[in-house]
Image (cartoon, rainbow, N blue to C red):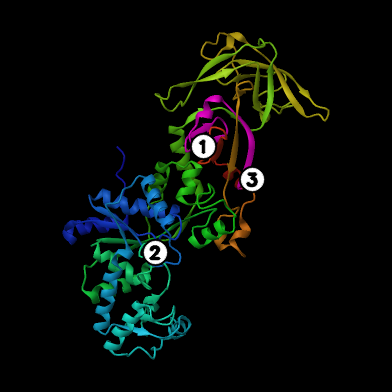
């Protein structure tokens, strides 16, 4: 009998809250992305966590866009985020935006001003920074800290009306300039930004800071478990302070450790650089760690969910080997993809004793892992394309593919015996000559021969062509952000190699964008979003085995 999986620390907290009757045993989480870029694999972990906890404990999970910075936020990002969440297999209970609460947040700010707990400051951002102090020295009060309540209300109203320029004034909480937590030293609540907002247009020119909008939005929605990454642990006292001073619903923040991934970067700022500087083709480039990029590359949503569940939830940050994600991808694709034949580096094989003009149709098994996978028709003829690496004129021992005198099985077809090869004037192999055994037909073999090698092939007469993009890891070092110099210096120059004319079996020409297959002996591939009937494009999703592990062992 298998052991029941142990609870993570967040599940333990929730189960204790339910047992204690906290919030009447109700569980309500939220996923609050800022729409300033595409979501990446780190966000996928958070999505799986927040939606997963809500589902496990019969609760609810909101989707709330933290759209408090009009400079960087766009509707395109909003729509892409929603598509990513749905594709991962989740559906939010309610959709909200921080901008839904702009008036309510403004009223909260006025309440704090009236309580003498907030003030309008004329100091510039640079001046505020210099008065903050350090971890060993207290900060100094702003000369505007003791303005009267009436003056602060008037000035804050004038900020809202657009009287002042960007940066001319801010609203700050009045807490303690000597507090040991620097975030509690009169933090900013509002700043002026005369920018068009993707939802509210030009109605507002003052926007709440994250720390002021976050907790209050949680409270308005009566979120019971506000789950953030560990970087926000020092923000929790401020989160609690605002809620306590306003006397509103006591949402509570919990933190878990983010999981970084090897051979990539997970900073939106750095990902944006890669896009804007054209190191990649866009946010959905299959080399990017974005959910859109992984979907386009052919990663199944189930694999990403499995990966998130496998790495688990912890309180200490660490870096996860991308091989674990690739393992989850392979495991899913092995169960679900059809095996097809594609020749990436072709050389022609001629069956000398096969009648010219004769053709046959073989029924090839789609997926040996799926008993209901069925078969597909594969045409066969006298001339075939095979992989160049499947022939060696002078092979080493234990080479079980084609060599003079060797027998091999052509997948789903016949056994052939290699007789030799043809070369051009430069000694390059142009053709391979074989004879076949008619009695060795796959599924009805009466030849009595046993062969150790099986190779794939595509009929020359029936072959379709496709462009194949061989994707690999975007960076050539495990942690590019921690290396000396600029992280972009470590981009892998071989992260994408294009094979412009690969031969594929004709059935594969029917593949729709997003369809995943296994190219036999070569890896898992996915029809690209740009693929059409007139221009077939396949992206390599992942190799059949962890090729990088071999390279590491060699080094």
Q: Position of residue 408 (x, y in %)?
A: 63, 20
How would you rate the neighbour count of disc 1 (Cα within 10 Å): few for under 14, some for 14-19, many for 20 or more? Answer: many
Q: CA distance from mark 1 to mark 3?
A: 33 Å
The residue depicted at 61 percent of the width and 9 percent of the height is: 438
Considering the numbered disc 1 on the image, is that residue within a helix, a strand or a loop?
strand
Q: Return the residue at label 1.
A: 527
Foreground pick, 16 / 130: 130
Q: Which residues are magenta?
A: 495-524
Considering the numbered disc 3 on the image, is that residue within a helix, a strand or a loop?
helix
Considering the numbered disc 2 on the image, is that residue within a helix, a strand or a loop?
helix
Q: Return the residue at label 2.
A: 230
Q: Total label count?
A: 3
Q: Are marks 2 and 3 in contact (CB under 8 Å)?
A: no
Q: Is residue 542 visible to the viewer in this orientation of the structure?
A: no
Q: Return the residue at label 3.
A: 554
Rendered view: 125 above or below 44: below
Q: CA distance from mark 2 to mark 3?
A: 37 Å
Foreground pick, 284 / 540: 284
Q: Residue furthest right?
A: 425
Image quadrant of residue 412?
top right
Q: Are marks 1 and 3 in contact (CB under 8 Å)?
A: no
């Amino acid at each position: 009998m298998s052991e029941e999986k142990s609870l993570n620390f967040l599940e333990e907290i929730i189960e204790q809250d339910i047992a204690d009757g906290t919030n009447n045993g109700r569980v309500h989480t939220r996923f609050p992305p800022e729409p300033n870029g595409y979501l990446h694999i780190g966000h996928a972990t958070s999505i799986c966590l927040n939606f997963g906890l809500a589902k496990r404990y019969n609760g609810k999970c909101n989707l709330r866009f933290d759209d408090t910075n009009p400079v960087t936020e766009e509707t395109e990002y909003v729509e892409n985020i929603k598509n990513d969440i749905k594709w991962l297999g989740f559906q939010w209970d309610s959709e909200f935006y921080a901008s839904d609460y702009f008036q309510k947040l403004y009223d909260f700010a006025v309440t704090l001003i009236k309580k003498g707990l907030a003030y309008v400051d004329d100091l510039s951002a640079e001046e505020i920074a210099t008065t903050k102090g350090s971890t060993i020295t207290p900060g100094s009060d702003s000369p505007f800290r003791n303005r009267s309540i009436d003056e602060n209300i008037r000035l804050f109203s004038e900020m809202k009306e657009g009287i002042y320029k960007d940066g001319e004034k801010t609203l700050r909480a009045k807490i303690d300039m000597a507090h040991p937590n620097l975030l509690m030293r009169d933090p900013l609540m509002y700043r002026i930004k005369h920018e068009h907002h993707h939802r509210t247009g030009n109605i507002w020119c003052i926007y709440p800071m994250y720390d002021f909008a976050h907790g209050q939005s949680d409270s308005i929605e009566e979120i019971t478990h506000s789950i953030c990454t560990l970087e926000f642990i020092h923000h929790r006292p401020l989160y609690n302070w605002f809620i306590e001073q306003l006397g509103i619903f006591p949402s509570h923040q919990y933190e878990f450790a983010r999981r970084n991934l090897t051979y990539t970067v997970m900073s939106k700022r750095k990902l944006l650089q890669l896009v804007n500087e054209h190191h990649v083709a866009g946010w959905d480039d299959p080399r990017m760690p974005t959910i859109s990029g992984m979907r386009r590359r052919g990663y199944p949503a189930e694999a990403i969910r499995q990966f998130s569940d496998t790495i688990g939830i912890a309180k200490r940050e660490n870096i996860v080997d991308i091989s674990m994600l690739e393992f989850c991808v392979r495991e899913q694709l092995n169960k679900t993809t059809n095996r097809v034949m594609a020749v990436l580096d072709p050389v022609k094989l001629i069956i000398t004793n096969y009648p010219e003009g004769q053709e046959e149709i073989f029924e090839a098994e789609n997926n040996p892992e799926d008993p209901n996978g069925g078969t597909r028709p594969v045409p066969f003829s006298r001339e075939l394309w095979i992989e160049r690496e499947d022939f060696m004129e002078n092979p080493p021992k234990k080479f079980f593919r084609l060599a003079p005198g060797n027998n091999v099985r052509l997948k789903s077809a016949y056994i052939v015996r290699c007789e030799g090869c043809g070369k051009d004037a430069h000694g390059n192999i142009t053709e391979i000559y074989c004879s076949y055994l008619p009695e060795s037909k796959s599924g009805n073999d009466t030849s009595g021969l046993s062969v150790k090698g099986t190779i794939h092939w595509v009929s020359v007469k029936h072959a379709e062509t496709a462009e194949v993009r061989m994707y690999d890891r975007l960076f050539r070092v495990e942690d590019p952000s921690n290396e000396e110099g600029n992280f972009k210096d470590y981009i892998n120059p071989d992260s994408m190699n294009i094979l412009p004319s690969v031969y594929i079996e004709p059935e594969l020409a029917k593949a729709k964008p997003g369809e995943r297959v296994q190219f036999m002996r070569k890896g898992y591939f996915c029809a690209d979003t740009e693929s059409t009937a007139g221009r077939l494009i396949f992206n390599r999703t992942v190799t059949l085995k962890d090729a990088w592990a071999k390279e590491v062992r060699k080094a």
